[in-house]
Image (tube, coloured by chain):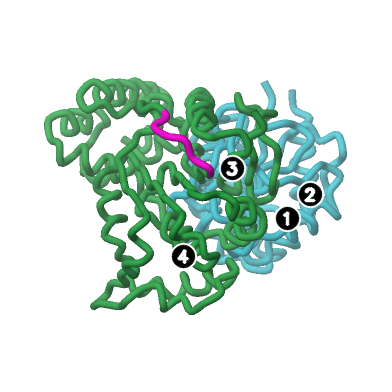
Chain colours: A cyan, B green
Amino acid sequence: MGYGLVVVGASLGGLKAVGTVLAGLPADFRLPVAVVQHRSPEVGDTLRFVLQDRCALQVREAEDKLAIAAGAVYLAPTGYHLLVEDEHFTLSTEGPVSYAQPSIDVLFETAAESYGRRLVAVVLSGTGRDGAAGLAEVSRRGGVAVVEAARTARSPEMPEAAWEAAPGALSLGIDRIAPCLVELARKP
Amino acid sequence: MGANDRPANSEEEGIEAIEISLLLEAIVRRYGYDFRDYAPASLKRRIRRIQGEERLPTVSALQERVIHEEACMSRFLDGLSVDVSALFRDPSFYLAFRQKVVPELRSLPLIRIWHAGCAAGEEAFSMAILLHEEGLLDRARIYATDMNERLLAKGKEAIFPIKHMKEYTANYHRAGGRGQFSDYYTAKHEGAIMRDFLRGNTVWAVHNLVSDTSFNEFNVVLCRNVMIYFNRTLQDRVHRLIYDSLPDGGILGLGRGESLQFTAVEGRYATLDLAERLYRKTG
């Protein structure tokens, strides 16, 4: 069985980085993509709008109990953590984890528990360490761990912390991440 | 056990799953709290956290302590209610409530509002303030219920940390607040005590959405960010309970990340405000 889900985490510099990755995915990309972009609590459609502009897949805010389906990119909503549970997402209003809400660690850890070796996880530009523990868990369960290379990251702190935490993680320049995902999606 | 109290391999994971199942069974038999239909991912995270805080090596050890020590059960219950809330959290919700629901409430001689799963009461107090500013508080009966008796008592005390007042004040204004937020509390030491006039029309009661039935009819039921912790089976059951507690035309409010789609009551409500999850029962 091939890969089943891609999870992406980003913080400072993420808007552009996530946009670049999504722009490189074809309209028939068969893996669902879930994204935690650290966001301020103010509600608004800006993130979704900006990302949709560069993305051939449908970009939407994740909702509680929403089915995880191919052809879509799901954004962790502000004011919640996004969790993966079997075939659908769930939400939590637990306090910040690794100082973040939504937290990349929470998405990655729950995704790793559900998808194990069928998971691909990507940590992009950002400050802090959110995503390091999560990526380590992804690696531990046999999933593919990817971090954005420091040389392309607006803020290399987060991907570097993740890279150090996750043995075997791949470090790729931002332009090489989408092609990598496309290739992984092709594997049966 | 692996790092952070997570299972180190799939065998340990299988064991943990069994232990969690037994823990929940033990709790329902011993204390009557039924968590068996809670959403598994968030429940698992909370159980692991509680286990860590209790400094116990296994979930089985936690089960032993929970069954034998009521104080531990109380801590367990608190561990399931660790959410951070705030007065006028989600200001846009209150704004929408003012604009779209309040006009419908004006014609009612008595306004009954149920905050189902109210935790420490932040939402109930926010509502009291809102209704007061709309001139409706005198006619309102606010029911704030939660399964956690300790949290309920805390809510009833009506004291919030003073250090949060700045955040709450900002929320209040973004929610369309018309007055001075400081008019609604008095500061004492490190606490801000909500003014008496905001408290008289609120009833605090223990009610468990899982095990208890509908206990009254309400014009408005707010159940926001409570059902995200339930699995779909339990969500449907609670939705039916809420549905039975509303008359035709009654208002339901959910959390921003929640939806009626694919629930048992989808199609039985009209949408009043999709973004803010306000719905009207159509019967």
Three-letter amino acid code at the position of disc 4: Ile
Q: Chain of mark 4?
A: B
The residue at which mark 4 appears reads as: B129
The residue at which mark 2 appears reads as: A22
Q: Is residue A187 magenta?
A: no
Residue A57's x, y, as percent?
82, 42
Three-letter amino acid code at the position of disc 1: Val
Outermost residue on the left side: it is: B68
Residue B129's x, y, as percent?
46, 65
Q: Which residues are magenta?
A: B214-219
Three-letter amino acid code at the position of disc 3: Ile
The residue at which mark 1 appears reads as: A18
Circle 4 — which element?
helix
Query: The C terminus of chain B lies in which quarter of the figure?
Result: top right
Can see residue A123?
Answer: no
Mark 1 nearby-residue class (10 Å; few <14, some 14–19, many ≥20): many
Residue B258's x, y, as percent?
59, 41
At 69% from the left edge and 46% from the top edge, which residue is drawn?
B272
The residue at which mark 3 appears reads as: B251
